[in-house]
Image (cartoon, helix red, strand yellow):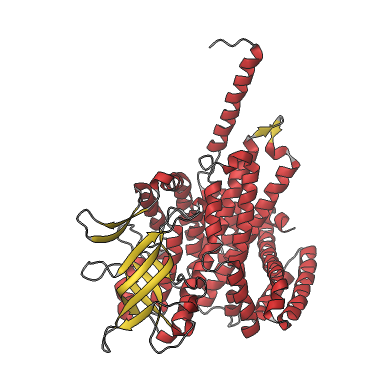
Amino acid sequence: MELPYEHDRERLASINWGRRRLEEWLTIQPTNFFIDDRGFQRSLEFLLGEEAYRPLAARLYRFGEVVAKTVDPLVRRANEPENLPYLERFDGIGRRIENVVFPDAYHEAGRHIYGSGVMAVLAEPGQNLASLALFYLSAMNGEAGHNCPLACTAGVIKVLQNVADEDLRERYLPRFLETDYASRFHGAQFLTEVQGGSDVGANATYATRLDTDSDVWLLNGEKWFCSNVTADVALVTARVPAQGDGTRGLGMFLVPRYLEDGSLNGVHIRRLKDKLGTRSMASAELEFQDAVAYLVGDARAGFKNMMNFVINPSRMYNALACCGNARRAYVVARSYARTRQAFGRPLIHFPLIQQTLVEMRSDSAAMLAGSLRLAKLWDEVETGKAAPAMAQVLRLGLNLNKFRTAMLAHDVINKGIEVLGGNGAIESFSVLPRLLRDNVVYENWEGPHNVLLAQASRDMRRYLVHQPFCDYLREMLRAQTQERLRAEGLAALEQIERELSDVLLMDETSASIFFRALMEQLIDLFYLACLGLEGMWSSLVKQDHSKRRLAE
């Protein structure tokens, strides 16, 4: 086509130039999420020491390339509307199969994720940090259809290792530690019911022993929000006869999807949930009709064991999932700002864009530093290497960390979308809309914000968990070599402790007005202390001052 004016040719050339800049943005995306994340490398070496870090780093190097180059496009494909999972309750001749159909891309991604050994490393106690490090890299692709199942599977592994009898342990545990996708087992936990939601004590699903000499129970009832519904084994709360109301009346049961003869158990899928996020992973409503189940542990300790070995670990994995979301959002926004131009210069030259990126980076680094510190503490508590008070530090830290990482990640992803402008809202343009949708679900999994804060408040009033937590934080602040950080951090902690003492003397209704803001300040100060210690070590040992500057 002949153009009438020279300036029209110039305008068309500018369109092509703009598209080439976007192509450049795509080409500079990381090809290895581990190599690209130097702060993550420094955190692990600081926490583990060089000797323990080296073999883990080699594994993370390999997996970091796989998740960036191979898994990322598979996850994108599996999350497209036409590829989302769908329910197939009956086969062609009307037999009940309760099957959920996933695309090939979903299974191919799973082969790579489970093949990393992210669950296999949990075979020995004290390997939670290693598992979570691998999980963090996987989480840079959002939930990816498999990251929720990984968190659930970790909980089943913990239960089999710590609570189950020898027969159940030998029958099931090896399959959960498999790296081969085709033969591995994956797990789930089904607690919530339509009438209670987070109020698990309102559960009505009940268990009946088959006979007095049998270890087999039958479950009847419904569960309302069952993620990873195709799990080979699920841990389910159900009411045990004559045990009373509330959570004390709940036992924890292991429910296999298939019975020993290969037939389906009495677990019926009512429908799949149409969720905002985590759409590649199937969540459902279930009905139990004489479902075969095995009691795990003491029937009177069912809810306690579920919290200690399933929900608390899941909250830790949830936190690292949020950290992965935040890091990926920062990487996408940073690279876009370097290549995208507006008003004659790259976006990254604009002070407001620079400020946004700094906020994204500092929040991402801080929440990761705090989460990895808690993961290391979890290892020490699990192996008996930590002082008894550290169990209380971990208890409070887990809940506050789950709450805060979800909030911060949401904010970081939103800022990333802001950097991309209108392009940031387009599903086909970048991973950011999917990360945001997934993160909204993360915020409500394993206890939404208010449930976590309510539990923290109860734990402080009943067990005084804030006292060892503040003592632990105080020691970290005293160890800082940056005078300003140490002095201002200690002063801030003293102020928080004073205000918290006053708040805990109030009735719970009045206290709730002030509690949330105080907990945000407390966990943010914990993040700052963790980041400061890492920055101190990095400056001294690696001559890397980036974290120190972030802490400042």
Q: Picture coordinates of residue 143 (x, y %)? A: 48, 55
Q: Picture coordinates of residue 519 (x, y %)? A: 68, 70
Q: Nearer the viewer, residue 315 or 91?
A: 91
Q: Picture coordinates of residue 530 (x, y %)? A: 66, 65
Label tally: 0
Q: Is residue 440 visible?
A: yes
Q: Is residue 479 above or below residue 94?
A: below
Q: Nearer the viewer, residue 123 or 212?
A: 212
Left or right: residue 521 compared with residue 416: right
Q: Is residue 87 above or below residue 213?
A: above
Q: Is residue 298 above or below residue 68?
A: below
Residue found at x 62% / y 47%: 416
Left or right: residue 380 compared with residue 457: left
Quadrant in the picture for residue 290? bottom left
Q: Picture coordinates of residue 499 (x, y %)? A: 76, 76
Q: Nearer the viewer, residue 458 or 475?
A: 458
Left or right: residue 23 compared with residue 163: right
Residue found at x 46% / y 72%: 310
Q: Is residue 173 visible?
A: no
Residue found at x 63% / y 53%: 412
Quadrant in the picture for residue 448? bottom right
Quadrant showing the C terminus: bottom right
Outermost front residue: 195
